[in-house]
């Protein structure tokens, strides 16, 4: 009896150590891997490029790219529109540069039915050193964040429709629908909230944030930008499919290099995000008129 008890006491530390070693591995095996987030090119007017960090490509309609780490550049007198795989549409005005610092998504919600709601929790961090973007978001789920920064401002987007402009004079943030929090400098920890119909100007030279109502003469132009972003959203939807070895996405960073940079665990994800272009909502009906029904002369 005592011999058995002593043997158990001797084995107990080894058993505990063995379970402790297995626990992290079991947790890692049970944790879902995040798929690589994507961007879809909905429209291009003129010349626009995307820098993947490996190649610089001319943007073409319906091409798909890995999102994180890319830089989108729109030339003068050119525009384009893109859709992120969380359902956010972005319209790029001429001479705009946007750097996707971080864009990750958790695994998609299975059997989702409301395409107006983003498919999973996402985290977006974009940098706009110059130019103007119109943003039209889907309904963000709890836990999602969307942050934009410029050389002199940080913007936390909760609005459905917002326009951000960055130029030598400073940053202008206009909320067309919803609320946006704007921070200016390290000392402005809490930031200030701008409501629907308001805009904030953050001067490049420094100074307090100036919040005013959007001038009537500018509203139409701003509304056009978010409308183009919203129209882009309707050209595509995204779904997660089981990953198959050897699959590639035309124009994607994976196809070009074989590398995935959007998220550390994306390479091991059992699923991948694919863009599915949509057909027109109402296809025109073609009528055929019989010769017998034509008026006689």
Image: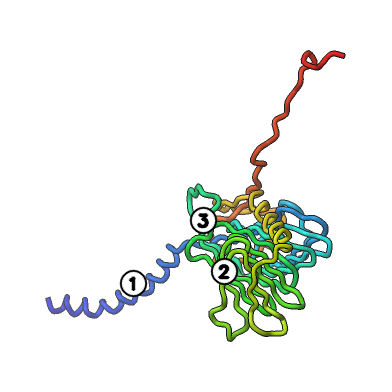
- Spot the residue most to the front: 216
Residue nearest the viewer, comparing 181 with 53: 181
Callout 1: 10 Å neighbours few (<14), some, many (20+)?
few
Query: Badge 3: how crowded within 10 Å, few (<14), some, or many (20+)?
Result: many
Which residue is identified by label 2?
A: 264
How many residues crowd mark 2 within 10 Å: few (<14), some (14–19), many (20+)?
Answer: few
Q: Disc 2 versus disc 3: distance between alpha carbons?
A: 17 Å
First in sequence, mark 2 or 3: give its number. Answer: 3
The residue under label 1 is: 19
Rounded to the nearest whole Å, what is the CA distance between mark 2 and mark 1?
27 Å
- In this rendering, does residue 255 appear at all? no
The image quadrant where one finds the N terminus is bottom left
Residue at position x 57%, y 76% in the image: 192
Give the secondary structure at mark 2: loop
Residue with the mark numbered 3: 108
Residue 131 or residue 175, whichever sits in front = 175
Tell me residue 178's x, y (percent): 57, 63
Mark nearest the camera among 2 and 1 is 2
Q: Residue 140: x percent and y percent?
A: 53, 60
Image quadrant where residue 225 sits? bottom right
Horizontal and vertical percent for residue 203? 70, 80
Return the residue nearer the eye: 271 or 40. Answer: 40
Task: Report the residue at 58% width, 83% height from top.
Answer: 188
Query: Is residue 87 found left or right of 283 in the rendered image?
Result: left
Residue at 64%, 68% (x, y): give it: 213
Q: Is residue 277 above or below residue 209?
A: above
Do the residues bearing badges 1 and 3 touch, measured as CB atoms within 8 Å?
Answer: no
Q: What's the residue at 62%, 68% (across, down)?
A: 198
On the picture, is 64 further left or further right than 75? left
């Amino acid at each position: 009896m005592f011999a058995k008890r002593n043997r158990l006491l001797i084995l107990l530390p080894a058993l505990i150590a063995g379970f402790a070693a297995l626990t992290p591995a079991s947790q890692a095996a049970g944790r879902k891997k995040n798929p690589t987030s994507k961007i879809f090119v909905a429209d291009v007017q003129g010349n626009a490029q995307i820098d993947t960090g490996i190649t610089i490509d001319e943007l073409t309609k319906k091409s798909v790219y890995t999102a994180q780490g890319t830089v989108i550049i729109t030339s003068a007198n050119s525009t384009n529109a893109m859709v992120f795989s969380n359902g956010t549409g972005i319209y790029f005005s001429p001479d705009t540069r946007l750097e996707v610092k971080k864009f990750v998504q958790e695994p998609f919600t299975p059997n989702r039915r409301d395409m107006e709601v983003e498919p999973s929790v996402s985290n977006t961090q974009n940098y706009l050193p110059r130019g103007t973007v119109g943003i039209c978001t889907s309904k963000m789920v709890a836990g999602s964040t969307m942050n934009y920064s410029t050389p002199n401002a940080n913007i936390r987007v909760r609005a459905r429709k917002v326009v951000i402009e960055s130029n030598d004079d400073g940053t202008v943030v206009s909320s067309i629908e919803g609320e946006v929090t704007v921070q200016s400098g390290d000392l402005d920890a809490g930031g200030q909230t701008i409501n629907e119909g308001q805009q904030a100007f953050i001067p490049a030279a420094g100074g307090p944030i100036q919040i005013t109502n959007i001038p009537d003469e500018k509203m139409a132009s701003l509304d056009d930008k978010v409308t183009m972003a919203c129209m882009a959203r309707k050209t595509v939807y995204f779904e997660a499919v089981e990953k198959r070895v050897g699959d590639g996405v035309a124009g994607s960073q994976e196809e070009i290099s074989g590398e995935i940079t959007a998220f550390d665990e994306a390479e091991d994800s059992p699923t991948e995000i694919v863009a599915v272009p949509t057909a027109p909502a109402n296809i025109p009906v073609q009528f055929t008129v019989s010769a017998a029904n034509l008026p006689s002369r």
